[in-house]
Image: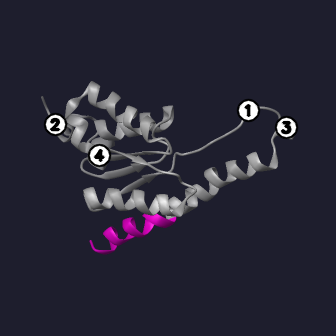
């Protein structure tokens, strides 16, 4: 059986050239969109940090991918991550860097929303939505962008 990078090198399109051996950090990777992003990156040769506020869903995302292709096992790691908590972000980023030495790509996918009429959404719900969907993105970028910049400054 071919390894993930070998499969990716046979794939057509720019994905194979762009993602082989890159480290991709996907937030909200336990959900439908995030898990699809993580799986697509892994198929195309990336090492993927599958991060979610619920570690069980991150583990399930990885288990599903490994069921489909066992060679992906060494290319993935599950991480519990609360994008609204700076210590959680610091710990998650450190885990990825400790394992793979860097982060090449950040996919800020974690998000929450509410259903219903806008007039029925409480101020606390709006604060939580903004905290995850805006502040969380900014905090993740603040933690990861310096790592990405450092790589390109050294080249």
* Label 2 crowd bin: few (<14), some (14–19), many (20+), radius 10 Å: some
Residue drawn at the location 50% of the way across and 45% of the way down: 53
**What distance separates the C-alpha of mark 2 from that of mark 3?**
51 Å
**Nearest-to-viewer mark from 4 and 3:** 3
**What distance separates the C-alpha of mark 4 from that of mark 3?**
42 Å
* Disc with the residue nearer the chain's start (1 vs 2): 2
> Where does the magenta region start and end?
142-155
Residue drawn at the location 24% of the way across and 28% of the way down: 69
**What distance separates the C-alpha of mark 2 from that of mark 4?**
12 Å
Check disc 2 and report its element: helix, strand or loop: loop
**Nearest-to-viewer mark from 1 and 2:** 1
- Relative to 120, 100 lies left or right: left
* Label 1 crowd bin: few (<14), some (14–19), many (20+), radius 10 Å: few
* Disc with the residue nearer the chain's start (4 vs 3): 4
- Residue under circle 1? 115
Residue 20 picture location, percent across and down: 25, 47
Any mark on residue 120, and which? 3
Residue drawn at the location 47% of the way across and 47% of the way down: 27
* Disc with the residue nearer the chain's start (4 vs 1): 4
- Residue under circle 4? 46
Any mark on residue 3, and which? 2
Residue 7 picture location, percent across and down: 20, 34
């Amino acid at each position: 059986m071919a390894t993930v990078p070998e499969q990716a090198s046979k794939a057509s399109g720019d994905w194979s050239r762009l993602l082989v051996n890159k480290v991709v950090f996907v937030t909200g990777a336990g959900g439908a969109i995030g898990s699809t992003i993580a799986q697509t990156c892994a198929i195309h040769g990336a090492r993927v940090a599958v991060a979610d506020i619920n570690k069980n869903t991150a583990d399930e995302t990885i288990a599903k991918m490994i069921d489909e292709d066992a060679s992906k096992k060494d290319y993935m790691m599950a991480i519990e991550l609360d994008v609204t908590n700076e210590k959680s972000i610091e710990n998650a980023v450190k885990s990825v860097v400790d394992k793979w030495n860097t982060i090449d790509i950040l996919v800020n996918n974690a998000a929450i929303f509410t259903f219903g009429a806008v007039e029925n959404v409480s101020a606390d719900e709006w604060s939580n939505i903004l905290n995850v969907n805006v502040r969380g993105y900014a905090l993740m970028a603040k933690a990861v962008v310096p790592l990405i910049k450092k790589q390109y400054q050294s080249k």
